[in-house]
Structure formats: structure tokens, C-alpha cells
Image (cartoon, grey):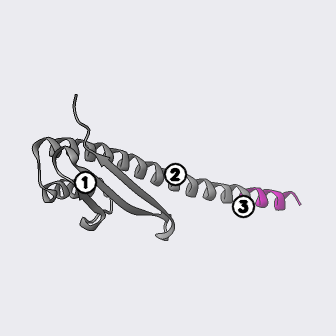
Amino acid sequence: MLQARQVNAKVALLIWALVAFFFFYLSYDYIQLTMHDRQFVDYVQFVVQLAGTENRSAKDIKELLLVKADQLSLPLSNEQIAIKGVGQNLNVIVKYDVDIDFPLTQRQIYTKAFAHDIKFISPH
């Protein structure tokens, strides 16, 4: 009877360890993804301010944003970036989805949608 309790305790400990592993893995992925998105938004704001001041083309803006997204491992394509207006009326809209995968199996369990609408802010 004592050995059965010890086996049950070890099995329970193993199950809790696996649950903790999956929880921390998913939390790490989610936090890293959120931090990369925050860095990307800061960069988009910088590019919008610079491009609005210098009257840069939509092509230049998209290229800069795609390079930064690639550096941050964000799945962003040219079609997911909309640029409206020019100069001080510049408005950049970025929408993309990122899949959160289940550890070891690489099966999607959650999709996080990001949408950002960034406008030129006139310096006063």
C-alpha cells in the first residue's frame, strides 16, 4: 500500500511538472511575441514620423517595415501594410496574425491578432 502511494505521488509530480513546462513555454512565447510587437510599433511610429517629415514614398515605408518585421521574426507581408496619405497626412495601418504553437508538436492552439493604426503627429 505504501509503494502504491509513492508511485501515485511520483506520477502526480510528473504530471504537474509537464503542466508547468507547457504553461511556461506558452507564457514565454506569448511574452516574447508581445515584446516584439511593442518594438515593432515603436519602430513604425519612428518611420511614420520620419517619412511624414521627409515625404518618403509608400514603397520606402513598406520596405523599412518589412525589414524590421523580419528582424523581429514577425510574420508580416506587403499586403498586410496599408499606407494612406503622404507627408503630414500620413497614416500607416498594419494588421497581422501570429500563431502560438503547442510545444513539441508545433500544432497551433491560439492565434493572436495584431492591428495598429499609426498616424503622423505634427511636431509643435
For marks 3 and 2, the one nearer the N-term is 3
Residue 16's disc number: none
**Does 56 sit above or below residue 105?**
above
CB atoms of marks 3 and 2 within 8 Å: no
Q: What SS does tag 1 mark?
A: helix
Label 3 and label 2: CA atoms lie apart by 24 Å
User: Which of the pair 59/9 is nearer the observer?
Assistant: 59
Label 2 and label 1: CA atoms lie apart by 21 Å
Residue 22: image quadrant is: bottom right
User: Which of the pair 103/111 is nearer the observer?
Assistant: 111
Query: Is 37 one of the magenta-colored residues?
Result: no
Give the image location of residue 54, x and y in percent. 10, 43
Give the image location of residue 34, x and y in percent. 42, 49
Q: Is the magenta stretch mostly helix, strand or loop?
A: helix
Give the image location of residue 52, x and y in percent. 17, 44
**Does 102 sit above or below residue 32?**
below
- The residue lying at 34 percent from left, 51 percent from top is 117
- The residue lying at 24 percent from left, 57 percent from top is 83
**Does 93 sit above or below residue 35?**
below
Q: Name the residue under label 2.
A: 27
Q: In which quarter of the image is the N terminus?
A: bottom right
Q: In which quarter of the image is the C terminus?
A: top left
**Does 52 sit above or below residue 22?**
above
Label 3 and label 1: CA atoms lie apart by 42 Å
Query: Which residue is farthest right?
Result: 1
CB atoms of marks 3 and 1 within 8 Å: no
Give the label, 3 or 1, closer to the camera. Answer: 1
Q: Name the residue under label 1.
A: 71
User: Which of the pair 5/116 is nearer the observer?
Assistant: 116
Q: Is residue 40 visible?
A: no
Q: Mark 3 points at which residue?
A: 11
